[in-house]
Image (cartoon, grey):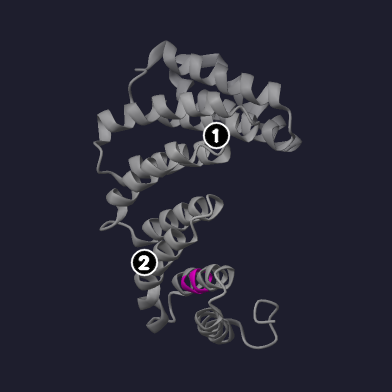
Amino acid sequence: YNNAISLATDANSIFLKDLDKYRTDYVYSLMIMASCYSGLWEEGKALQLVSNAIDIYRETFDERDLLYAHLLLYQANLHHFFKNVDEAIRLATKAIDIQKQFLGDNNLEYASSLNRLASYYSSIEKYDKAIPLLRKAMAITADKDQYQYSDLLNTLTDIYEKKGNIDEAIQLLKESQQLLRKYVCNNEDQYGLLLYTGTLIRLASCYKSKEEYNEAVQLDTEALEITYQLYGKNNPFYA
């Protein structure tokens, strides 16, 4: 991190010589430095750099454009990283409003931001706020990106498990299982197989919690067979 900060500092000195020409580059350089300082857990420096970057951007560019929304989302993520969740929610909400204006409410990038906001609410156990956001994102991704849709299903499953609603969690995992089953016949898509296997294991765990062991054994056995196909018997994942 320190080497990266040193390089970014050198770059900034060049950008500042002609800020009108290199304003966007300077903004991104400040964001890189902020990311480095967050990695060093220096909250004050990281947040100040992001704030400076946004102020510099606003001096020239429109506060209602997509790049400004991206900057706000980055700032929100940084606040969430440092446990400033209320501020993260405020910033993400503002960014999402801008994205909706430019992208519409049926866009994958918009759906991804809804998922991010839902994760902020979930982190402070405001599940009733998180669930509608996830449902909305799922409606957008259902026929556009099955990987993202499956990820949203799993995120929603996490919430219902935390709420103790195992039956609802099982229904969501079954939907994910059905969605990802096609990858079992396509060994070239290793990522899809891994997602499918993870879904089987989670579903088995839910059935165990309900003491429905026959269902759990069948699912664990299928997951084990796929793991063997992927890695062989000498791999820690199989063990």
Q: Which residue is mark 2?
A: 175
- Up/down of 32 relative to 188, above or below: above
Relative to 231, 27 lies left or right: left
Q: Is residue 170 magenta?
A: no
Of tags 1 and 2, the one toward the viewer is 2
Crowding around mark 2 (Cα neighbors within 10 Å: few <14, some 14 to 19, many 20+) is some
Q: Quadrant of residue 146?
A: bottom left
User: What residue did someone put label 1 on?
Assistant: 77
Image vertical order of residue 84 relative to residue 177, above or below: above
Q: Position of residue 52 (x, y in %)?
A: 56, 16
Q: Quick check: can you spot residue 110? A: yes
Residue depicted at x 56% and y 16%: 16
Kind of residue sitting beneath label 1: Asn
Q: Nearer the viewer, residue 74 or 162?
A: 162
**Residue 182 placement (x, y as % from top left):** 35, 77
Circle 2: element type: helix
Q: Nearer the viewer, residue 38 or 113?
A: 113
Give the residue type that dot 2 points to: Glu
Cα distance, mark 1 to mark 2?
Answer: 30 Å
Magenta region: which residues?
A: 196-200
Q: Quadrant of residue 38?
A: top right
